[in-house]
Image (cartoon, rainbow, N blue to C red):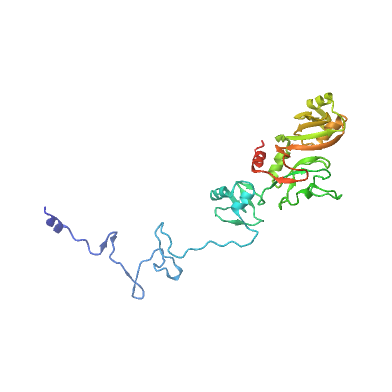
Amino acid sequence: MSSSESNSSRKPASKGKGKFGDNKSKRRESPSGGSSKKSFGGRSAAGKGGDRPYRKPGQRPTGPKKSAPKQSKDPSLIRLNRYIANSGVCSRREADTYIAAGNVTVNGTVISEMGYKVKPTDEVRFDGRLLNREKKEYVLLNKPKNFITTTSDEKGRRTVMELVTNASKARLLPVGRLDRNTTGLLLFTNDGDLTKKLTHPKHEVRKIYHVELNKNLTAADLRKIQEGLTLEDGPIEVDDVSYVQNAPKREVGIQIHSGKNRIVRRIFEHLGYDVVKLDRVVFAGLTKKDLPRGHWRNLTEQELINLKNIK
């Protein structure tokens, strides 16, 4: 069969039929006599009267974009990533990653918006842990005599807080205690987690003292200390004790991790000695190098890493 015959033998399409079947009536008569187009979902295709125009799935709206609500310009507000960084969890850049991943909540709501700001009264949690917006600070003091380790004193005595007044605007607290007449290293911080770690007995934080006695320490008493003593509040063991090299035998170095009150003085008093001078020369790996008596300095980044790595 020729091409022309084939074409002539085809039946013409039925009048009024379209692609999807019978479409005889493309328009309906409106009650007013005019024609109206078929609408979708009862809404006008023109979008009048508050109706929205029909959009195919996945099609973006063509109307004006709605802007995100602006936050207050309250100076007390702080960006969420900075809040997290100040709390010591991670850097600001890392905080953005955690925020985007949904690890952070503000007042119980997950926040994934970059640039979000929080108020001082907001409750911010990272993986469920409550954070403090105050930047963590760490100050090391070489304490002189005649200062008591407390934040205030009702008797009007001088406190160690006077020595670190200009060290930070944050509310720093001493980690542990040193007696009024004991000199040496004293750490201050607003990091409560680190304070707990450095003062809890299970971590056995190393402390070394230079002791000067009222008389020479006998070899027999030195051995007693090495072997361990039993004081009024129970047994006590030292990590190490020895005479100070190239010094009289009344000068002793003692390493201990116990946090008991006045423990070094009580060890020697138990054996009949008076402690004339007591100086803490090492605390948790920190030393007095280049830190004169009565002065303070901020911890270095490496020193802070070492403290946080204490198991």
Among the 4 quarters of the image, the one containing residue 193? top right
- Tell whether 130 sits left or right of 66: right
Residue 85 versus residue 119: which sits nearer the camera? 85
* Rendered view: 128 above or below 229: below
Residue 239 x %, y %: 75, 30
Q: Residue furthest bottom?
A: 32
Image coordinates for residue 61, horizontal then vertical, percent: 43, 62
Say whether residue 108 is visible: no
Residue beneath the point at 70% across and 35% down: 203
Percent x, y of residue 29: 33, 72
Of 166 and 207, the residue lying toward us: 166
Is 301 on the left-hand or right-hand side of 226? left
Is 84 placed above or below 69 here? Answer: above
* Relative to 158, residue 308 above or below: above
Residue 118, how many percent across, how many down? 62, 56
Q: Looking at the rendering, which quadrant does residue 39 occupy?
A: bottom left
Residue 86 seen in this snapshot: yes
